């Protein structure tokens, strides 16, 4: 019996026409941009006529479990393998949506999301890393994203790899300029 933690294949945020707003893939099952766009188009076309505004809906598309929710002119999707737990995927989706709502002060629409795209990608980074779920509590996600503005105050142990490299680069630059 093989034990494993739930894995997320991708998180998609598409507009009302099925175009990308913010997407993040965590596996190699879609090796190139064309296959990713084809998957996004397929999932969007199969879900656009559903009414997933009040609650998240769950569907099986192309052999993947997709949990989705529509808000205003945005479509939120979380994809997992066919053996993943739908409730866990739904919890990730709800955490992502609620964190975005908190950060954007309940003004969740395409224009506002595009103006704050950096916060959206930071949310994605806080929720999932390499397909592994890190956090689903919206308040915790939003707090971590909000504190990213004060990079100097973040302990090295809580920084992402990119942040740690940027911090190291800054320290090296300062030491070379002295």
Image: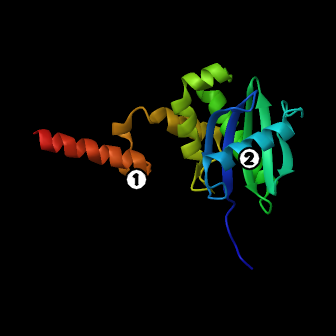
Q: Is residue 169 left or right of residue 101?
A: left
Residue 157: assigned label: 1
Residue 105 in the image: state x and y as whole percent.
63, 22
Q: Residues within 10 Å of mark 1 (few under 14, many from 20)?
A: few
Report the side of 8 relative to 67 (left or right): left
Q: Secondary structure at mark 1?
A: helix
Percent x, y of residue 8: 67, 54
Residue situated furthest front in the rendering: 34
Asked if residue 5 can be seen in this view, the reply is yes
Question: Which residue of the protein is positioned furthest toward the right in this rendering?
Answer: 50
**Residue at x-position 62% and y-position 55%:** 31
Whether residue 169 sits left or right of residue 6 in the image: it is left
**x, y (%) of residue 29?**
67, 58
Q: Quadrant of residue 46?
A: top right
Image quarter of the C terminus: top left
* Residue drawn where x is 61% and y is 21% of the image: 112
Q: Is 3 above or below relative to 18? A: below
In what element is the residue under mark 2?
Answer: helix
Closer-to-camera residue (165/36): 36
Viewer-closest of 114 and 161: 114
Q: Earlier in the sequence, mark 2 or mark 1?
A: 2
Residue 103 quadrant: top right
Disc 2 to disc 1, C-alpha distance: 36 Å
The disc placed on residue 39 is: 2
Residue 2 sits in which quadrant? bottom right
């Amino acid at each position: 019996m093989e034990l494993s933690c739930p894995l997320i294949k991708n998180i998609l945020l598409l507009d009302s026409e099925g175009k990308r707003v913010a997407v993040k893939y965590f596996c190699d099952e879609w090796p190139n941009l064309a296959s990713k766009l084809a998957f996004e188009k397929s999932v969007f076309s199969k879900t656009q006529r559903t009414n997933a505004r009040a609650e998240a809906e769950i569907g099986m598309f192309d052999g993947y479990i997709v949990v989705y929710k529509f808000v205003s002119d945005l479509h939120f999707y979380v994809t997992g393998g066919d053996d993943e737990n739908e409730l866990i995927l739904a919890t990730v989706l709800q955490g992502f949506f609620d964190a975005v709502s908190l950060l954007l002060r309940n003004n969740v629409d395409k224009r506002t999301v595009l103006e704050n795209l950096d916060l959206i990608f930071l949310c994605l980074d806080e929720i999932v890393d390499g397909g592994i779920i890190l956090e689903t509590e919206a308040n915790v996600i939003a707090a971590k994203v909000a504190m990213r503005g004060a990079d100097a105050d973040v302990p090295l142990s809580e920084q992402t790899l990119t942040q740690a490299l940027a911090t190291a680069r800054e320290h090296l630059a300062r030491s070379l300029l002295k």
